[in-house]
Image: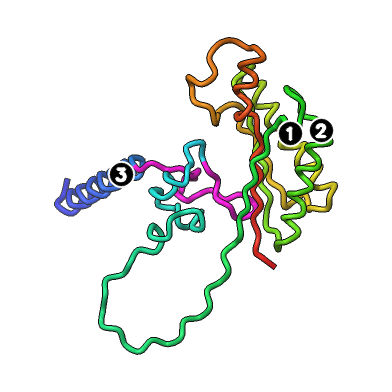
Amino acid sequence: MNKTAKHSAMALLAATIGLCASLAQAQAVDRVYAIDGRGEVVMDPYGLCWRTNFWTPAAAAKDPAGCTCDKDLLPKEVCEPKAAPVAAAPAAPAPAPAAAPARDKVTVAADALFDFNKATLRPEGKAKLDDVVAKSQQLVLEVVIAVGHADRIGSAAYNQKLSEKRAASVKDYLVSKGIPANRIYTEGKGSKQPVTKPGDCKGPKSPKVIACLQPDRRVDIEIIGTKK
């Protein structure tokens, strides 16, 4: 191998080692948003970042994309760190900040919307959703996010489908009240995100256990838009 070829091979090897190190470092960072093959955060059709099951406000504050995706949910000091003091020249008047999207999150007990183990809206549930419609009318609406949840009773596959059907029923009702279908995003989480702790509701299925697991049967509805 001539000298020039040897140098080229060594340069290629060094670049490959550096690339592998960069990938390993990126994988070591805990991410709470879905990441595509380019390392970019995945967005839904409404420009909202896709959250993973590990998303919490505290975890988002540590994610490199947290301030981009959920700045209004994070502590101000996380996304706007204090700058070091410098000798200030007379400052020009700052432009008025753009209005941040208003977020209104409503958690509705699934039993207020549906009978136990059902996905058909009850009359009382429709009244709850009418409140959601009224709040959305106070905004220049961007998106309504409805996420259905189920308790641990039943198989994971069954609970996943039940949570999706409940979220879909909520969407159908909101559309019937005039909210555009393309402004409503639905998702089912099954029994993967319980509110109760593992030792709270011990024992097999029984009226007592069903009542104890009530907080896990819920629909989270988030309304996002700018104030009129």
Which comes before the other along the chain, label 2 or label 1?
1
Side of 190 relative to 134 (left or right): left
Q: Which residue is mark 3?
A: 25
Q: CA distance from mark 3 to mark 1?
A: 46 Å
Q: Are marks 2 and 1 in contact (CB under 8 Å)?
A: yes
Looking at the image, the residue that sits furthest to the left is 3
Q: Amino acid at mark 3?
A: Gln
Instruction: Count residues near mark 1 (Cα–Cα under 10 Å), then give few for <14, some for 14-19, many for 20+.
Output: some
Q: CA distance from mark 2 to mark 1?
A: 8 Å
Dot 3: what SS? helix
Give the vertical position of 60 relative to 82 (above or below). Answer: above
Instruction: Count residues near mark 2 (Cα–Cα under 10 Å), then give few for <14, some for 14-19, many for 20+.
Output: some
Magenta segment includes 37: yes
Q: Amino acid at mark 2?
A: Arg
The x and y percentages for residue 206 are 65, 12
Q: Which residue is mark 1?
A: 112
Magenta segment includes 77: no
Dot 2: what SS? loop
Task: Identify which residue, 91 or 160, lies in the foreground.
Answer: 91
Instruction: Count residues near mark 3 (Cα–Cα under 10 Å), then give few for <14, some for 14-19, many for 20+.
Output: few
Specify the segment rendered in magenta.
29-51
Which comes before the other along the chain, label 2 or label 3?
3
- Can you tell which mark lies on residue 67? none
Task: Identify which residue, 40 or 127, lies in the foreground.
Answer: 127
Q: Which residue is mark 2?
A: 122
Q: Residue at x 39, y 64 (%)?
A: 80
